[in-house]
Amino acid sequence: EDEPVESGGGSVQAGGSLRLSCVATRRRRCMGWFRQAPGKEREGIAGIDADTSISTYADSVKGRFTISLDGGKNTLYLEMNSLKPEDTAVYYCAHIISCGTWSFRYWGQGTQVTVSS
């Protein structure tokens, strides 16, 4: 019941862009995105504090990805530019227990992003 719903994934060539969306069941102060590639550990990549608009990024995506929030719609976005093959993963949005950390809970089914070289 608290699981958000992600959408917007797909297949693109390296250098391309995608925009992921996530509709949350209700407003939460701290939200973010993590991804998981086959055989790899979960990686927190972006988070945002809805009260301050302060965002946090992993070094692997900094400068390429942008997280944003439409509070009125409880919708979280992830704009992904300059995509690389190593960005290939299932992307999940989730509530973050503490803003500025990668402590996720209540994530959805995820959306697949595939970047080809």
Image: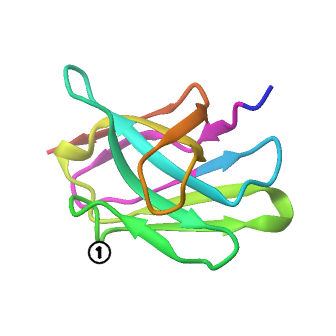
Residue plotted at (51% across, 58% down): 78
Could you say which is closer to the camera, residue 103 or residue 93?
Answer: 103
Question: Is residue 113 shown left or right of residue 75?
Answer: left
Is 16 colored magenta in this rendering?
A: yes
Q: In this view, does 93 lie above or below 71?
A: above
Residue plotted at (43% across, 58% down): 46
- The quarter holding residue 51 reads bottom right
Where is residue 38 shown, x and y percent of the image? Answer: 24, 22
Specify start and end residues of the magenta stretch as a single range. Answer: 3-20
- The quarter holding residue 108 reads top right
Count of marks placed on residues: 1
Q: Which amino acid does label 1 sit on?
A: Gly
SS category of the residue bearing label 1: loop
In the rendered image, the quadrant that contains the N terminus is top right
Q: Which residue lies furthest to the front in this view?
A: 98
Where is residue 85 shown, x and y percent of the image? Answer: 18, 44
Q: Which residue lies furthest to the left in this view?
A: 117
Where is residue 26 shown, x and y percent of the image? Answer: 83, 47
Q: Is residue 52 above or below residue 65?
A: below
Where is residue 95 shown, x and y percent of the image? Answer: 61, 45
Could you say which is closer to the camera, residue 117 or residue 112?
Answer: 112
Q: In this view, does 6 lie above or below 21?
A: above
- The quarter holding residue 71 reads bottom right
Question: Is residue 113 shown left or right of residue 72?
Answer: left
Residue indicated by mark 1:
63
Is 85 colored magenta in this rendering?
A: no
In the rendered image, the quadrant that contains the C terminus is top left
